[in-house]
Image (spheres, rainbow, N blue to C red):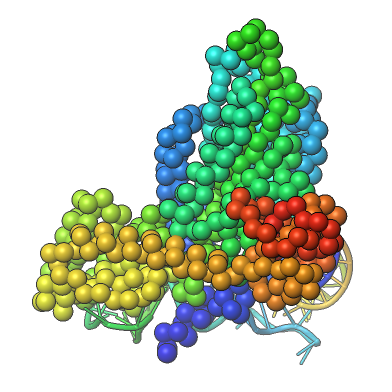
Amino acid sequence: MANDKKLVEAITSMEEDFAQWYTDVVKKAELCDYSSVKGCMIIKPAGYAIWEQIQQQLDAAFKKTGVENVYMPLFIPESLLQKEKDHVEGFAPEVAWVTHGGLEPLQERMCVRPTSETLFCDFYKNEVQSYRDLPKVYNQWCSVVRWEKTTRPFLRSREFLWQEGHTVHATAKEAQERTIQMLNVYADFARDVLAIPVVKGQKTEKEKFAGAEDTYTIEALMHDGKALQSGTSHNFGDGFARAFDIQYTDKNNTLQYCHQTSWGVSTRIIGAVIMVHGDDSGLKLPPKVAPTQIMIVPIQQKKEGVLDKAYELKNRLSKQGFRVKVDDTDKSPGWKFNECEMRGIPFRIEIGPKEIENNQCGFVRRDTREKISVHLDEVETKAAELLETIQKDMYEAAKAHLESHTYTASSWEEFCDSINNKPGFVKAMWCGDQACENKIKEELAATSRCMPFEQEQISNQCVCCGQPAKKMVYWGRAY
RNA sequence: CGAUGCGUGGCUCAGUUUGGUAGAGCGCUGCGUUCGGGACGCAGAGGUCGCAGGUUCGAAUCCUGUCGCAUCGACCA
């Protein structure tokens, strides 16, 4: 069809080149643009509005669990960053340094925060004195800077937006509970709002966060079969507390070290939304996170009454709390349809003289392209139903993809075959030795994604070395 | 940091081999006709060809240097 031809020109097909498809969608949906600084992106209104939805809804979920928001400084003095050994080793290679204030060199250089553990620790050191001061459950929404060498919009930029939660607790148990609680907040959010199914589990020693005792993750599977770490939650034990001397006096008047956690989700998760749900026509947004849920497209809009009817529908739907717009530009209807699809608007309503004559309008779903005739009296109820259906169906589709692209391997041959020929997760047993992880990474460019909470006994032996297996691990190639 | 590619109106690019008045399509502005899957006509606006040197009567084009961006690898949310 002629139409297809135009679309192919606009968006590279996924099959042909997934990376190019991703870039095309990001640009055509006007989510972001490149800036004059390598790896720093300009987030445009369509992209930022998605982030605002994520912020609002995650923030509400956080606050239900007692989180309070704060704001920490952008700069970290070098001496402060140095305090926790593993942490500084992990981040030093990718921090940006400020060396001058105006024309004067600084007596101590400062880095632009790559993450704020050290700042929170420095703060908590004074803030926490007694068991009565605990816990502190703080979070900040901010941007951080990591001087990446290879960058991609949303997935890996030098500056990115995120939230970082940092908590201090009296006991190890409480810290562990908070770590898992927040991981669950992320997993539920991914499922219920972003319609993304995830695998929940623990990172291996090799993959865990610099300075953490344990790192937990939600891993999502992109359409091309590559994994994307979509949120993390760390239990620091008392490691940072010892490095920063964060102590409190307990009920028995003894000094105790605190136990801490941190957890974060970044704009990277927008990349996950794009790569989990999108197709060759562009973005597909789950209704709950779509900044515009419904686009009303008037047809033959100069004909008497058409635009009036479109605005009337918009007002009725807005009143019900839907995020709805009318595309009253003077573009042709075909152009508007394509635009809706590229931008991922969950469904559009077509209304023209024909519909008005029949007291109807047409709902066209973005996810399935199904067209439904709806009586004008039923627009509100049908819209509510349809948004719910789309949200559910998108999740089911993503879940089906995850399941059909998760394989098991009990031998090295099977494992290699899966990793090399069947993009997706591979479940396989592991002995717990980092040497096997290293070998797998070197030979297959795959990493351990996580040790899932839901363990299965696939075999008794490590898929790599044949030694007795300790854990079932999800493996895969990752972004 | 390695490999590859690319820097020419807002965008995509042609022009560079063989030096000779800066081009096209899309987009943009105005007017009119259109409107059911990226409509059309007419009239316009818009570029010191990434930057700096050099060669030449003359450089987008040749030479030297330099900067930037993208994609893929290694490293990392």
Image quadrant in which you'd find residue A241: top right
- The residue shown at (38%, 61%) is A391
**Front-most of B47 and A90?**
A90
Question: Is residue B46 found left or right of A248 in the rendered image?
Answer: left
Q: Does residue B3 appear left or right of residue A76 in this picture?
A: right
Q: Is residue A186 above or below residue B26?
A: above
| Residue A220 drawn above or below residue A209 | below
Left or right, B34 with reference to A198: left
Query: What residue sits 66% from the left and 22% below the top?
Result: A258
Where is residue A393 shown, x and y percent of the image? 39, 66
Residue A112 x/y as whole percent: 68, 37
Asked where in the image residue A419 lies, by quadrant, the reply is bottom right
Residue drawn at x 20%, y 60% as measured from the top left: A381
A61 relative position to A305: left or right = right
Tell me where residue A392 appears, x and y as whole percent.
38, 62
Quarter of the image containing the N terminus of chain A?
bottom left
Say which residue appears at 29% left-offset and 76% top-offset.
A371
Q: Position of residue B70 (x, y in %)?
A: 66, 64
Dividing the picture into quarters, in which one does residue A222 lie?
bottom right
Q: Quadrant of the C terminus of chain A?
A: bottom right
